[in-house]
Amino acid sequence: MTDPPTQLFLGGAWADAADGAVMPVDDPATGEILAHVADAGPKDARLAEEAAVQAQEEWARAAPRARSEILRRAYEIVLERTDALARLMTSEMGKPLAEARGEVAYAAEFFRWFSEEAVRIDGGHGVLPDGRNRMLLSRRPVGPCLLITPWNFPLAMGTRKIGPAVAAGCTMVLKPAPQTPLSSLALAAILKEAGLPDGVLNVVTTSRAGEVCEPLLRGGRIRKLSFTGSTAVGRLLLAQCADTVVRTSMELGGNAPFVVFDDADLDAAVDGAMVAKMRNMGEACTAANRFFVHRSVAGEFADRLARRMGALVVGPGTGDGVDVGPLIDAAGRAKVEELVADAVERGARVLVGGTTPEGPGCFYPPTVLTDVAPESRLMATEIFGPVAAILTFDDEDEVVRRANDTPWGLVGYVFTEGLDRALRVSERLDVGMVGLNTGLVSNPAAPFGGVKQSGLGREGGRVGIEEFLEYQYVALPTG
């Protein structure tokens, strides 16, 4: 794979920003600049929108099999370039190469999944109850979409949105996070190589998100927004969508509870905790944020988790044997430092970690805290770092109440050997997803999303394409 593009992708061609602006892409492991990419402004956004609008009608008429085969080819190309894409991801956002390779496989699977869904879009036919009319139902693409992706899974969040949009027959303007534009630009090049027609996908990399996105959402030609990011930004975007009633799907913040009951298999619980907490250095919306452990097993669980966390190797993601890379930037690390300091001031005990290393890069060590006060800020804040905060509980009703005491509801984790309790507690948790005796819930074949302020709609699974389709009903007289 050659060096990734650094220009905007507009109407199937690479272009500089209209005003010539560029922005740096930093390596969080060293602080050095990897590349400069085009920094789009409002004029570039309008060009991207125009390309998407102009391509929409013809793309909507494209045969489902043709859309399917483009996605299938893109799937194969992504897998063929696993190593190059993984290194690109590691360089711009820090995750270890092993994790980056795993993300490439995960990202590719969205293309394969939705290549299969493209040919299964159906409708319906029937006679209405009064017998006077037949009902003909068909599905059609919602129209041009704005896709906004985060930096923590730069490849997979792109494919998770692009895949169903392509399958449904929608055109797109993709705005990736400014920290990780290179993965998205590489993805655009792959889709062009796979045969995606010009104008179907347009990519605007920018540090001026408000100037670029707000005019698109308020302009009336973008008909769908798919956003993954913070709840605060999600609220702002929802307000901007209201003027023209833009259809929205949003995967927002989380504050995941991780509940360990007294009858849990502690080996499985610690294994699950390592996945749920340490995937992507804890920089995941699905990361376990609040560990509620039954008082009778809390000490043993904490000790085992601290030993496992303390044994992880921290360093640049490209290093041999590295388990934990840097956090995304200095601001992200400062947030983690402040949350840990606040918890310690309120009486938390540090079992491992908790001290920022000297030297370059945005590194923070895996950290386990016990005796955490419920009023600590990290109990009500998405940590987005490698910090496990442990609290104890005594009974089921108490822990369910505390687990649900948050405005978020993306995912929860429950560890217990009792079948009745497992199902009962899962049903009582106010979350969109539950990991039952597992620390990993993400899968392209499953509907991903949350309730409350964790978002709207679902991505992935058989319902993922629904977010990009509309129904049309035609009444046909029977007589």
Image (cartoon, rainbow, N blue to C red):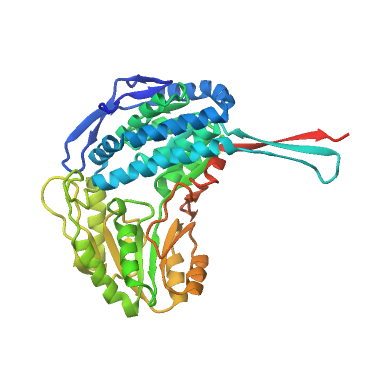
Residue at image location 24% in from the left, 38% down from the top: 87
- Image quarter (top left, top right, bottom left or bottom right) of the C terminus: top right
* Residue 221 visible in this rendered orientation of the protein: no
* Residue 362 visible in this rendered orientation of the protein: yes
* Residue 421, horizontal then vertical, whole percent: 48, 73
Quarter of the figure with residue 43: top left
- Image quarter (top left, top right, bottom left or bottom right) of the N terminus: top left
Residue at image location 35% in from the left, 20% down from the top: 14
Relative to 302, does residue 222 appear above or below in the rendering? above
* Residue 55, horizontal then vertical, whole percent: 52, 22
User: Is 206 situated left or right of 395 in this image?
Assistant: left
In the foreground, 230 or 195: 195
Relative to 353, does residue 109 appear above or below in the rendering? above
User: Is 48 situated left or right of 137 in this image?
Assistant: left
Furthest toward the right, the residue is: 479
Quarter of the figure with residue 473: top right
